[in-house]
């Protein structure tokens, strides 16, 4: 394991309630630092908190009085208490859209909601996770912010670095959608296309971390991954608070590496343990595109291990063929009574159009995946239409225009009423 120590690790860093890093496999604990794998068993490290001393009523009041961003949940995140005053993009507190029209089309009677994360500063959920990694990068004295990205992360890192005064240099597969390339480059950092797919990009970044060339670099989703990952908990917090401090019965989450899904589950369990929501069962459903479906394939086959795939799908933001958190996703789907399902690219496009037509929400392909999977799970009798259901849209359709190419003019007419009538538009 490559360990990079920039700041002195002899003094303790202030990352709020974050107390240590703890191995998800063997429980081995190490002090907070830019490490991501257990030195005992190579399992993934995650943040262990000290939430002792929190009173549920007082915490709820403090959250409700907080800023309209993820920082209202600062007492539950690995960030210093004064985080909202530091230069960052203040992401989160996105809309929870009550989707009654879509519910009618899908036959959902128990209440259907879209958690619309296209409203974040760089138009995807990635701003939530990058904001945590940025605080860790500050705490550990890194000067360059970097990542391996399927597209959205590159833009989120570029923007966060620009605002916070870091250098940024990010790595993407060379064949990404134009919208994502522009979004990643516009903030003035360095953007490097790698000849290969995301898994090749990721492997390259791991090598760079172990090399002197990567010294002083914080890779938000590699050596800062334990901190980064915690940002996804804020989706769980917001959904429950926006439902009036209630757990949804069912939640449909897209899967790339699987990190978001596992941390949404962690966030929901924390709210239960802290007494902020009632302790009752919820089900988590994972969504993939058929062209990159290693987790749903394993789920349906009843396997505990996830066999890597070579991605081939229009849902490029989810195109991780070897998902690091795949086995944990399987555990969570099985433990909560959920499922993992996949849809074809054609069904993704249909679902993007369905959501836009019914609710006025233009989702990127990842949102087409979750809406498409929701429809399929209802049709198959797996998702209960009589229960409260939240479906995530994690990105903006303007970034994946190619997916809906061919959508355009109804007619072209001369500027006369006759022409208008001839076209059958009256
Ligand atoms: C990164 C991403 C996800 C989820 O990623 P995980 O690696 O599973 O956490 C979901 N949707 C979009 C649009 C993304 O960019
Ligand atoms: Zn371990």
Image (cartoon, helix red, strand yellow):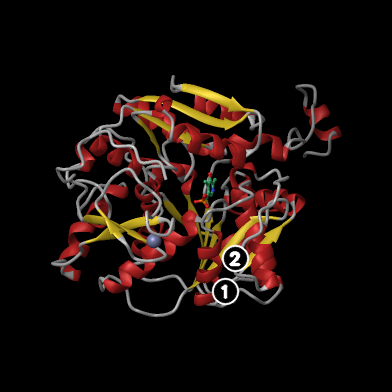
- Label 2: few (<14), some or many (≥20) within 10 Å? some
Out of 410 and 242, give the one closest to the viewer: 242
Give the residue drawn at x 39%, y 49%: 36
**Residue located 50% across and 64% down the image:** 328
Q: Which mark is residue 209?
A: none
Do residues under tags 1 and 2 come within 8 Å of each other at their CB atoms?
A: yes
Mark 2 residue element:
helix
* Residue 380 drawn above or below residue 123: below
x, y percent for residue 109:
57, 74
Is residue 386 found left or right of 297 in the rendered image? left
Q: Which residue is mark 2?
A: 103
Q: Is residue 381 left or right of residue 252?
A: right
Local SS, label 1 = loop
Classify 421 as above or below 105: above
Q: Nearer the viewer, residue 18 or 245?
A: 18
Real-space Cα separation, disc 1 to disc 2, in angstroms: 7 Å
Q: In the rendering, which numbered label is found on residue 109?
A: 1
Can you give x and y, in whole percent of width and height, for residue 182 in the image?
A: 55, 25
- Work out whether residue 167 can be spotted: yes
In the image, taking residue 413 as reference, residue 246 lies left or right, namely left
| Snapshot quadrant of residue 156 | top left
Whether residue 371 is visible, yes or no, is no
């Amino acid at each position: 394991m490559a360990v990079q120590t920039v700041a002195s690790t002899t003094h303790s860093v202030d990352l709020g309630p974050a107390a240590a890093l703890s191995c998800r496999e063997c429980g081995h604990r190490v002090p907070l630092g830019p490490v991501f794998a257990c030195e005992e068993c190579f399992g993934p490290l995650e943040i262990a908190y000290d939430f002792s001393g929190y009173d549920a009523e007082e915490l709820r009041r403090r959250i409700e009085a907080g800023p309209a961003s993820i920082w209202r949940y600062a007492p539950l995140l690995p960030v210093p208490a004064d985080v909202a005053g530091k230069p960052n993009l203040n992401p989160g507190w996105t809309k929870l859209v009550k989707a009654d029209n879509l519910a009618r089309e899908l036959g959902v009677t128990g209440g259907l909601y879209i958690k619309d994360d296209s409203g974040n500063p760089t138009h995807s959920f990635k701003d939530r996770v990058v904001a945590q990694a940025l605080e860790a990068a500050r705490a550990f004295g890194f000067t360059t912010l970097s990542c391996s990205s399927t597209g959205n992360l590159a833009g989120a890192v570029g923007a966060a670095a620009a605002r916070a005064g870091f250098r940024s240099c990010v790595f993407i597969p060379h064949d990404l959608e134009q919208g994502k390339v522009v979004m990643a480059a516009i903030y003035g950092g360095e953007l490097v296309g790698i000849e290969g797919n995301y898994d090749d990009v990721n492997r390259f970044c791991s090598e760079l971390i172990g090399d002197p060339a990567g010294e002083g670099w914080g890779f938000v989703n590699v050596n800062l991954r334990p901190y980064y990952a915690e940002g996804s908990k804020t989706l769980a917090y917001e959904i429950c608070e926006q439902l009036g401090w209630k757990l949804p019965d069912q939640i449909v989450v897209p899967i790339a590496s699987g990190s978001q899904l596992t941390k949404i589950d962690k966030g929901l369990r924390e709210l239960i343990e802290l007494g902020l929501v009632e302790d009752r069962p919820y089900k988590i459903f994972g969504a993939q595109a058929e062209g990159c479906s290693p987790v749903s394939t394993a789920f349906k086959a009843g396997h505990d291990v996830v066999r890597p795939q070579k991605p081939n799908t229009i849902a490029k933001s989810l195109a991780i063929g070897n998902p690091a958190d795949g086995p944990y996703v399987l555990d969570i789907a099985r433990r909560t009574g959920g499922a993992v399902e996949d849809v074809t690219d054609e069904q993704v496009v249909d679902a993007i159009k369905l959501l836009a037509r019914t609710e006025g929400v233009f989702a990127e392909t990842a949102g087409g995946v979750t809406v498409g999977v929701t429809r399929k799970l209802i049709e198959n009798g797996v998702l209960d239409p009589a229960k409260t259901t939240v479906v995530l849209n994690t990105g903006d359709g303007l970034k994946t225009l190619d997916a809906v190419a061919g959508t355009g003019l109804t007619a072209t007419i001369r500027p006369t009423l006759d022409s208008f009538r001839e076209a059958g538009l009256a």
